Image (cartoon, helix red, strand yellow):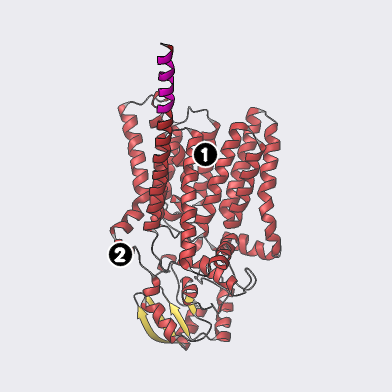
Amino acid sequence: MLKNKIFSSKGRLALHGMTKTSGWKIENLWWFGLFLILLFFHSNHPLNSDEGVILNGAWNLINGRELYTDFFEFISPASFYLVFWLWKIFGAHYLAIKFFAIIIVFLSAIGIHKISQEIFKNKFNYFFPLVFILSSIYWPIINHNVFNILFVIWAIYFFLKGLSNYLSKNFIISGLLTGLSILFLQQKGIILLFSLASFLLILLFKEKKYQLLKLNFYFILFSFLPLLILLKWPLQILYENLIIFPLFNYIETNRLPFFLFIFFFIVFLSAIWFLRKERDKKIWLLFYLQFFLLLSALPRPDFYHISLILFPLYSVLLIPLIKKNSFNFNFFKKSYYCLIISLTVFVIIFPSLLIIINNSFFFYSIKNSEIIFYIENNCQGKYLYAGPFIPGIYFETKKLNPTPYSILITNHQTKEQFLKAREFLKKYQPTCAVLNYKIVEKFNYGKNNLVDNYILNNYKFVFQEGNTSIYKY
């Protein structure tokens, strides 16, 4: 009988070991599958304007130009230097950066899963990382928004861990990651810093645990440590480029209807309503963060900027359906909540579905376009002008922008900047000017400006492909 018990015990242990190993294999297969989805759907090499801003900034650095002094940018420096350093290691190739950006999206998806597991451990927590990855099909992933969100996600994860055990190291790591997020995108990084620090203050008044004061000090102190790198530039230049310019010159050209914002705000309020009786401070931290992250998307509330910042909602949205015993759901409540989740997922991935349907996008490379071929064979010299908003042309053709501005959009750049750009065009006289006005129609671009008038008066139309035209001096 004792022998039977021993064998029975060993059998249960063996079965438990097999189950654990099997689960580990399935989990790894799942993540491997998600990585393959990313590789497949981001296999293209487009000429994307949002990617072009980062590529052109890094290309300027490769060519010895100094950020903020030799050329103008209104986002914080880390994205440009990340691409610059990668090119120094692997050579200035688009695919090297694209692969690295894929890894960033993948690590962000893992971070979303880890955040969900901190809230409520469940197998359904694998679902929203899939939604996040599918939504990324639509994104320009070589971009400061994507790079920034990786650090935002993992800063929140370590902050949540800190709320579980109040260990200083978690708040220190969260602080460092928050500081890095500011270096990639100042607006969202600052919002993250404010949200997390103020939440700890609220918690301090609620719980009367004065240890939280020390933890908040560590968090804020280590958030500022990465920012010391900004001392490389004069503070006046940083203030004008990174604070004043985006504050007063970004919103006017990016006005969009608020339909998407309103929809997701309703989803956000619905989740709060269903989880209103929950007392878990981690859940309320995610709601608190989601509110401020949604506000951060108000300057341009499109699919891209909103879908990037919905991950706190991902981590709580399924809780009312998973924790069935904790919620008194009648048929109508359950139907409403299932409808909300279904609509949310559909709206998030809708732009990606459109791209999948139009599958000619996959494996496309701008290198095969006639525009690039024409420039390489007919536009001699070191300089090329590409505008108003096609900065990727510079890296693709390995030429330099004669002006200090990656983009020149009316009501976005100032009149003084247009005047300065025209003077640089006169000084360097690039052989060719490449123009595409279709891209900037959404910004209500005005063609009657100093730069366009100079080009149209001094350059002659010579070639066109699609909406892109080339003018020669």
> Magenta includes 229?
no
The boundaries of the magenta stretch are 3-15
Relative horizontal placement of residue 372, taking residue 205 as reference (left or right): left
- Picture coordinates of residue 170 (x, y %)? 62, 40
| Quadrant housing the N terminus | top left
SS class of the residue under badge 1?
Answer: helix
Relative horizontal placement of residue 22, taking residue 429 as reference (left or right): left
Neighbor class of circle 1 (other Cα within 10 Å; few <14, some 14-19, many 20+) is many
- Height in image: 222 above or below 98? above
SS assignment for the magenta stretch, majority: helix
Please report the residue visible at 60 percent of the width from the left and 42 percent of the height from the top.
Answer: 196
> Magenta includes 11?
yes
Seen from the viewer's position, the closer of residues 461 and 253 is 461
Seen from the viewer's position, the closer of residues 156 and 4 is 4
Report, in whole angstroms, how far the alpha carbon at label 1 lies from the one at label 2: 39 Å
Q: Name the residue under label 1.
A: 286
- Picture coordinates of residue 162 (x, y %)? 61, 36
Please report the residue visible at 39 percent of the width from the left and 46 percent of the height from the top.
Answer: 130
Neighbor class of circle 2 (other Cα within 10 Å; few <14, some 14-19, many 20+) is few
Give residue 268's quadrant in the image. top left
Task: Let me know if residue 302 appears in the view.
Answer: no
Please report the residue visible at 45 percent of the width from the left and 84 percent of the height from the top.
Answer: 456
- Picture coordinates of residue 189 (x, y %)? 58, 51
SS class of the residue under badge 2?
Answer: helix
Please report the residue visible at 30 percent of the width from the left and 61 percent of the height from the top.
Answer: 359
In this view, which residue lies farthest toward the front? 3
Give residue 172's quadrant in the image. top right
- Picture coordinates of residue 464 (x, y %)? 36, 80
Q: Mark 2 points at which residue?
A: 360
Mark 1 is on which residue type? Leu
Mark 2 is on which residue type? Ser
Task: Let me know if residue 62 appears in the view.
Answer: yes
